Image: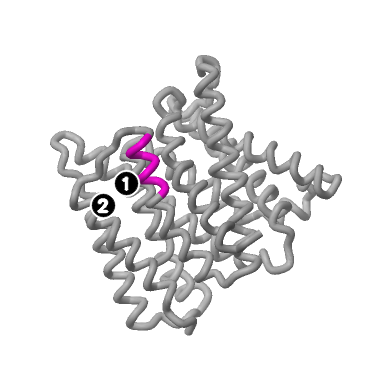
């Protein structure tokens, strides 16, 4: 399968998946939705693994290999899904596009990659873009939107940790098995954390009793799309192309996300937020055109 088509596909799945998640949150609580999505993803990947390899990817060795799942989908989406609930879907996907720049910065810190002046300049541009994105001029909505934007940004940092770990593993691993293992580890961590939180605050309790059939289908479909298929395609791309080339297509996620948010939710980003999103996307694009140092 063409690597460019693979990259476009995972950008599409993540961008539209964020909007579908925002839509599902209208009836389903954030904790319940995330658990349903992860269970749907794990079951989908388990069936695919059994069809392909005649075995399930849940052995002890496979679970150790899937340790990156602690960062994403577990921590990244536990934090991010609350952020999406408090902010707009278009804000969420635009802030998430800063992942490319954050990857460059964290790779310099943890992997010893050279941090050039060009990279620093692009990081500053990206930061300005994110600052514009978190600004909400709607009266009475500043506090909640700001908190939501910050949570989405924190989730993006966890996502970068996932990328750094996965890049080290994918060279000698099967993308399908690695994706399934990571998703299963993410599900275990998510259920455990929500279980602890629900004992402290009942609002974190997972309860799927009153969900209507359309929203069940929306939750299951968005889980398979945003988690199983998107991560499988992303790891497949990482195995065949340099990380910088795979990361370039992450900048396209806002295009699919904002487009679907406008079509499905009727959202209209402000001019400042569009400018901020443009800063993030442009800085991401040029960051990935830099020659590896």
Q: Secondary structure at mark 2?
A: helix
Q: Main secondary structure of the magenta part?
A: helix
Bounds of the magenta span? 256-263
Quarter that holds the N terminus: bottom right
Judge whether 159 appears above or below 125 on screen.
Answer: above
Give the side of residue 254 with respect to residue 56, left or right.
left
What residue do we see at 50% from left, 26% from top? 205
Instruction: Residue 182: give its label.
Output: none
Judge whether 244 appears above or below 214 on screen.
Answer: below
Q: Pointer 2: what residue?
A: 133
- List x then y, in percent, for residue 97: 39, 57
Q: Secondary structure at mark 1?
A: helix
What residue do we see at 32% from left, 40% from top? 88
262 part of magenta stretch: yes
Q: Nearer the viewer, residue 9 or 169?
A: 9
Q: Pointer 1: what residue?
A: 91
């Amino acid at each position: 399968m063409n690597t460019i088509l693979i990259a476009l596909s995972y950008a599409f799945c993540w961008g539209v998946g964020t909007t579908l998640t925002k839509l599902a949150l209208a009836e389903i609580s954030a904790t319940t939705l995330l658990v349903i999505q992860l269970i749907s993803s794990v079951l989908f990947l388990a069936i695919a693994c059994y069809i392909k390899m005649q075995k399930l990817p849940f052995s002890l060795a496979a679970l150790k290999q899937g340790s990156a799942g602690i960062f994403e989908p577990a921590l990244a989406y536990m934090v991010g899904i609350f952020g999406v609930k408090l902010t707009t879907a278009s804000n969420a996907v635009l802030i998430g596009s800063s992942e490319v720049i954050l990857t460059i910065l964290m790779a310099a810190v943890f992997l010893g990659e050279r941090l050039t002046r060009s990279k620093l300049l692009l990081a500053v541009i990206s930061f300005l873009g994110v600052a514009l994105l978190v600004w909400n001029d709607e009266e009475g909505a500043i506090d909640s939107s700001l908190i939501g934007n910050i949570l989405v940004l924190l989730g993006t940092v966890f996502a970068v940790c996932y990328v750094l770990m996965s890049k080290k593993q994918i060279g000698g691993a099967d993308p399908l098995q690695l994706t399934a293992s990571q998703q299963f580890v993410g599900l275990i961590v998510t259920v455990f954390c929500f279980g602890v939180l629900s004992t402290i605050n009942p609002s974190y309790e997972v309860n799927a009793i009153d969900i209507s059939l359309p929203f069940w289908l929306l939750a299951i479909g968005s889980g398979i799309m945003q988690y199983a298929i998107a991560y499988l395609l992303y790891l497949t791309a990482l195995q065949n192309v340099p990380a910088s080339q795979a990361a370039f297509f992450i900048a396209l996620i806002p295009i699919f996300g904002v487009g679907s948010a406008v079509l499905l939710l009727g959202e209209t980003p402000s001019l400042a937020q569009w400018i901020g999103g443009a800063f993030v996307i442009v800085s991401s694009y040029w960051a990935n055109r830099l020659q590896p140092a």
